[in-house]
Amino acid sequence: MPGDTPLAPSSGLDPEIAARLSRDAQGLVVAVVQRHDSGEVLMVGWMDDEALHRTLTTGRTTFWSRSRRAYWVKGETSGHRQWVKEVRLDCDGDSILVKVDQEGPACHTGDRTCFDADLLDAVVGVPTPQGVPR
């Protein structure tokens, strides 16, 4: 279907890297963004070949917006930029880990991270292994 896939006809992504990617039906791979110094998980976004190519070559995290159907660079409008320090591909090729220096909050809500809600704290009676604090 025209317009449903973000894959650019001619991405500049290295063919060896592209061959290792296991994309979903829309041509996307999930990208987990993590602070390079503390290991804190900041956010998740989606990348196609072109977004990954831009991320690797510009040093700025670039994602594909599934709702807007457009590329976006983290911090381009908010000023909360991410500077890429390391990019890793998991063993299955279906997720990317991007380690960054984060300027300001990572979440669009203004929070430091998009992962600030602990769901286990909200559930009463969840067993934990004996002797292991939560």
Image (cartoon, rainbow, N blue to C red):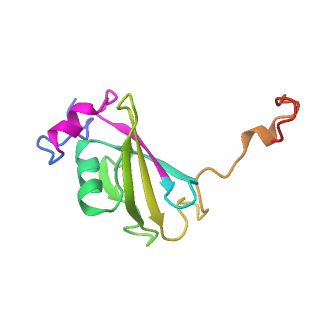
Q: Please determine whether, in this image, residue 4 is positioned above or below residue 111.
A: above
Return the residue nearer the eye: 88 or 6: 88
Residue 39: x %, y % from top left: 56, 54
Instruction: Tell me if residue 22 is in the magenta stretch.
Output: yes
Task: Report the number of numbered marks.
Answer: 0
* Viewer-proximal residue among 10 and 97: 97
At 31% from the left and 30% from the top, the residue drawn is 23
What residue range appears in magenta? Answer: 14-33
Residue beneath the point at 37% across and 60% down? 84
Q: Is residue 27 above or below residue 39?
A: above
Residue 134: x, y in percent? 81, 42
Quadrant of the rendered image containing residue 15: top left
Residue 21 screen position, x and y as percent: 29, 33
Residue furthest to the left: 10
Give the residue at x 51% y 51%: 43
- Report whether 59 appears left or right of 104: left
Give the image quarter of residue 130: top right
User: In which quadrant will I find the N terminus?
Assistant: top left
56 vs 126, left or right, is left
Is 4 in front, or is 63? 63
User: Would you say residue 47 sits in the magenta stretch?
Assistant: no
Is residue 108 found left or right of 82 in the rendered image?
right
Residue extending farthest to the front is 131
The residue at 35%/49% (across/down) is: 68
Residue 75 coordinates in the image, percent (x, y):
41, 66
